[in-house]
Amino acid sequence: MTKQSPKQSPKPGELVLQPNGKGALRHGSEPGTNKGGTGAPPSKVREACRESFGKRIPILETIADNDEARDLDRIAAMAALGKYGGVDKLALTVDEQPEVEMTPERVAGLFEQIQRIKTVKQLEKLLVGAAKKQGGE
């Protein structure tokens, strides 16, 4: 391992000291030098993330149920629980289709209503109203 002057180019594969003095790297891309490892398999990473998320579900529930938390935080916690719980999208079966035809205008109106939600109370009111219309209560 030699320290090279800026004018002199090291040979491929030669160890070159780093400017900070902490270690050395091989120069160039000679086959077999600086070969990286395979890393963690993606399936193992996803599994670890799922397990970590599962352990933190009680935290999200605590935030969602905390009347003293900011509304934005409560909505975000409920959204995360819904998203990863698989209930973040409308999934209506043929038997659950609304009686009213879903026209582009109606969908645009519903979207505008959803965008105006600023508090947990407003979200709860919208959800209760939707459940009553579907015969849920």
Image (cartoon, rainbow, N blue to C red):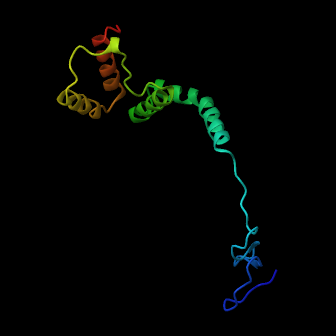
What residue is rendered at 24% in x and 28% in y?
Answer: 110
- Please report the residue visible at 34 percent of the width from the left and 11 percent of the height from the top: 95
Is 62 situated left or right of 133 in this image? right
Q: In this view, does 88 lie above or below 40?
A: above
Does residue 22 appear to the left or right of 96 in the view shown? right
Could you say which is closer to the camera, residue 52 or residue 61? 52
* Residue 20 placement (x, y as % from top left): 70, 76
Q: Is residue 6 above or below residue 61?
A: below
Q: Where is residue 94 in the image (x, y as percent from the top left)?
A: 34, 14
The residue sitting at the front extreme is 31
**Which quadrant of the structure image shows residue 89?**
top left
- The quadrant the N terminus occupies is bottom right
> Furthest residue to the bottom?
7
State which quadrant residue 133 falls in.
top left
User: Which of these two is toward me, 6 or 97?
Assistant: 97
Q: Nearer the viewer, residue 117 or 29?
A: 29
Closest to the observer, 110 or 67: 110
Q: Residue at x 69, y 87 (%)?
A: 9
Judge left or right: residue 33 versus residue 50.
Answer: right
* Residue depicted at x 71% and y 60%: 36
Extreme-right residue of the structure: 1
